[in-house]
Image (tube, rainbow, N blue to C red):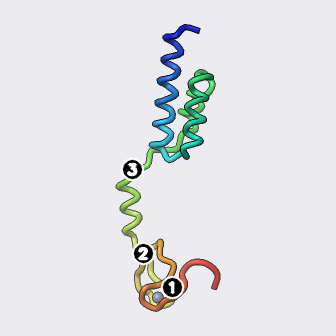
Amino acid sequence: MHYLSFLIFFLAGIYTVWDSLQRGRSHISSLLWGMGVTFLFFVFFPLHLATRPKLSKKSTIDVTDDIEVACPKCHHYYKPNANFCPNCGWHIKGDE
Ligand SMILES: [Zn+2]
């Protein structure tokens, strides 16, 4: 194998690791994808492009964090990640 083509595959592997991390894949999964692209570029690079998760903007996540949900008991608004209603103490998540 030519050194130059290996260098290109290696850089593509690094790009794949970075791209996977940006798109929310786990560290181990991203490293495996990067190794796959480095050693089997023509198999894993098109596969990575086809299966990679969509890029999620952080601003979108911040917006959903600000959305508040009404308590089913007292209709007081609370954050969606809360376990108990701050107004009446109603157990929002889990078993009744
Ligand atoms: Zn409540």
Q: Looking at the rendered structure, which numbered label has been put on residue 72?
A: 1
Q: Mark 3 sits on what residue?
A: 57
- N-terminal label among 3 and 1: 3
Question: SS for tag 3?
Answer: loop
User: Marks 3 and 1: which is nearer the front?
Assistant: 3
The amino acid marked with disc number 3 is Lys
Q: Earlier in the sequence, mark 2 or mark 1?
A: 1
**Picture coordinates of residue 59, whole percent (x, y):** 35, 55
The yes-or-no answer for disc 1 within 8 Å of ligand 1 is yes
Q: Is residue 84 left or right of residue 58?
A: right
Picture layout, residue 78 above or below residue 32: below
Residue 79: give its label.
2
Task: Identify the element where label 2 is drawn.
Answer: loop
Q: Measured from the top left, where is residue 17 in percent x and y? A: 50, 35
**Residue drawn at point x = 55 percent, y = 8 percent:** 2
- Give the amino acid type for the residue marked by disc 1 in the picture: Pro
On screen, residue 38 above or below 82: above
User: Quick one: quadrant of the N terminus?
Assistant: top right
* Separation of marks 2 and 1 at Cα, in angstroms: 13 Å
Crowd around label 2: few <14 · some 14–19 · many ≥20 (10 Å)? some
The quarter of the picture where residue 68 lies is: bottom left
Q: Are marks 2 and 3 in contact (CB under 8 Å)?
A: no
- Is 90 rendered above or below residue 35? below
